[in-house]
Image (tube, rainbow, N blue to C red):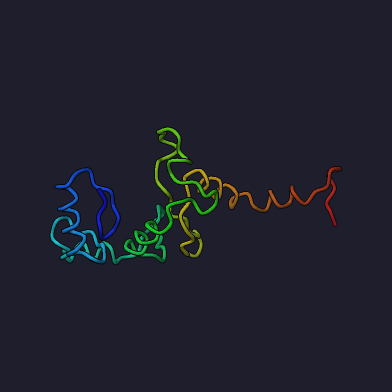
Amino acid sequence: MECKYCGRECKNENSLRNHERMCHSNPEKQISYGNHGKMPNHTKRYYQTKIKDRDGKEVNITRYQLDQYMIEHQKCEICGQTIDESCKWESKFAPKHLCMDHDHNTGEFRGVLCSRCNRQLGWYEKYKENIESYLSKNKDGMLVQ
């Protein structure tokens, strides 16, 4: 059973009816927590503030913008895999979610990546000069001119 407003699959007629009622009263798909689309002020502020990374630096995207971006981009932007394809098992080192990628120097939001590509990109950025120096060598260990 599919919602006629958003296309979401519902388990039974009762949940479909309730979901369609909420979809119809909340056309912008804001998180409403059962209050029929009237979001409390503290929740609005939460979605309108810019996100901070682990170091406490501000990233130039709000939570609402990130939620909208994640709805549109369901796949890793490097390897193209969905989260179910990229994480085959539950692991504390490979969480089952897409990561928000950003430039740590400028705070510029770049996109969403699976946890594997996000870790590898961070490693590459850390050792970029060494990697490029290594790749510029020819087979004899001499630098290519």
Rendering coords of residue 12 (x, y %): 19, 44
Rendering coords of residue 32 (x, y %): 19, 59
Q: Nearer the viewer, residue 28 or 141?
A: 28
* Residue at (64, 52) in percent of width and height: 128
Residue 90, above or below 141: above
Q: Which of 51 and 66 is in front in this view?
A: 66
Q: In this view, does 14 lie to the left or right of 126?
A: left
Q: Which of 115 and 127 is in front in this view?
A: 115
Rendering coords of residue 144 (x, y %): 84, 53
The quadrant of the picture occupied by the C terminus is bottom right
Q: Is residue 142 left or right of residue 53?
A: right
Q: In this view, does 54 lie to the left or right of 142?
A: left
Query: Which of the 4 image quadrants contains residue 38?
Result: bottom left
Q: Is residue 16 left or right of residue 82?
A: left
Rendering coords of residue 36 (x, y %): 14, 62
* Residue at (43, 50) in percent of width and height: 99
Tell how many labels.
0
Query: Which of the 4 image quadrants contains residue 21?
Result: bottom left
* Residue at (45, 35) in percent of width and height: 88
* Residue at (51, 62) in percent of width and height: 105
